[in-house]
Image (cartoon, rainbow, N blue to C red):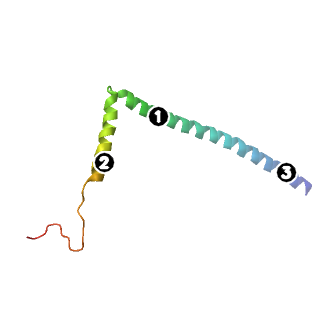
Amino acid sequence: MKNIRIFASLVAIACMAFAASAATQVKEVAVAAYNAAATVFLKGFELSVLATEDKTAVVVAFVQAKAFVLRLIKRDRPVVSTNWTLAPSI
């Protein structure tokens, strides 16, 4: 009976050691993959900005987009009522 307990505890210790080493290896791979993906993602944005010869073109595009959104917000929209039709008859 005592030998079975010793054997079981040795097996448990071996399993814990294996799990710890496997977790460390998986963690290193996962962290490396995340860092590589983040670097590629961020470098892609930097390269896209650097690829434009005129830096003001990027700023102008953002200003134009903001102006478009503001025009959409200010636009008058028809009020729909219960008797409203798309093409009223005259």
Which numbered marker is on residue 42? 1
Please say if 76 is above or below 24.
below
**Quadrant that contains the C terminus:** bottom left
Q: Residue at x 24, y 67 (%)?
A: 80
Q: Residue furthest left?
A: 90
Q: Nearer the viewer, mark 3 or mark 2?
A: 2
**Quadrant that contains the N terminus:** bottom right
Please say if 4 is above or below 68.
below
In the rendering, at what x and y percent does residue 76 appear?
Answer: 24, 57
Q: Could you say whether the residue bearing mark 1 is in a helix, strand or loop?
A: helix
Which numbered marker is on residue 54? none
Q: Residue at x 78, y 46 (%)?
A: 14
Q: Is residue 22 left or right of residue 84?
A: right
Label 2 sits on residue:
70
Q: Identity of the amino acid at label 3?
A: Phe
Q: Could you say whether the residue bearing mark 2 is in a helix, strand or loop?
A: helix
Q: Could you say whether the residue bearing mark 3 is in a helix, strand or loop?
A: helix
Quarter occupied by residue 63: top left
Mark 2 or 1, nearer chain start: 1
Q: Residue furthest bottom?
A: 83
Q: Nearer the viewer, residue 2 or 51?
A: 51
Q: Is residue 37 left or right of residue 26?
A: left
Mark 3 or 1, nearer chain start: 3
Q: Nearer the viewer, residue 79 or 48?
A: 79
